[in-house]
Amino acid sequence: MAQELLAIVLVAACAAHAGWTLLLPAAWRRRMAQSLLRRHGPAPLQRRLQRTARPPSACGCDGCDAGSARAAPRAVQPLHWTPRRRR
C-alpha cells in the first residue's frame, strides 16, 4: 500500500512539473507565479517564483539579463554562406 501511494505521489509530481515547464505558456506561468507570490510560503519557493514572475528579456533567453549590469548589445556581424561539398 505504501509503495502504491509513493508511486501515485511521484507520478502526480512529475505531471505537475511537466505541465508547468512544458505545457503552460510563459504568460500563464508568469501570471500564476505572481498570484502565488501573494501567499507566503517557503523562502526557496518564493525565490523561484520571483524569477518566474519577472517579465521576459528582449531576446528570450535567461542569460544576458541575469547579471546586475545589462550586457552591451553586440555589433552586427555578416553571415557567410558556404556551399556544402558534394560527395
Image (cartoon, helix red, strand yellow):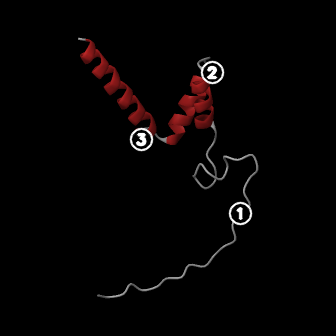
Describe the element under mark 1 as helix, strand or loop: loop
61 or 2: which is nearer to us?
A: 2
Which residue ends up furthest to the front in the rendered image? 3
Describe the element under mark 2 as helix, strand or loop: loop
Q: Amino acid at mark 3?
A: Leu
User: What residue is disc 3 on?
Assistant: 22
Label 2 to label 3: alpha-carbon separation: 24 Å
Describe the element under mark 3 as helix, strand or loop: helix
- Decide: few, some or many residues near mark 3? Use Cα within 10 Å; few <14, some 14-19, many ≥20: few
**Residue 47 location, x and y as percent?**
62, 30
**Residue 19 location, x and y as percent?**
40, 34
- State the quadrant of the N terminus: top left
User: What residue is disc 2 on?
Assistant: 38
Q: Amino acid at mark 2?
A: Arg
Q: Dots 1 and 3: beta carbons under 8 Å?
A: no
User: What residue is disc 1 on?
Assistant: 73
Q: Is residue 11 above or below residue 4?
A: below
Mark 2 or mark 3, earlier in chain? 3
Residue 85: name its quadrant. bottom left
Label 1 to label 3: alpha-carbon separation: 30 Å
Mark 1 or mark 2, earlier in chain? 2
Q: Amino acid at mark 1?
A: Pro
Q: Residue at x 56, y 30 (%)?
A: 33
Q: What's the mark number on residue 39?
A: none
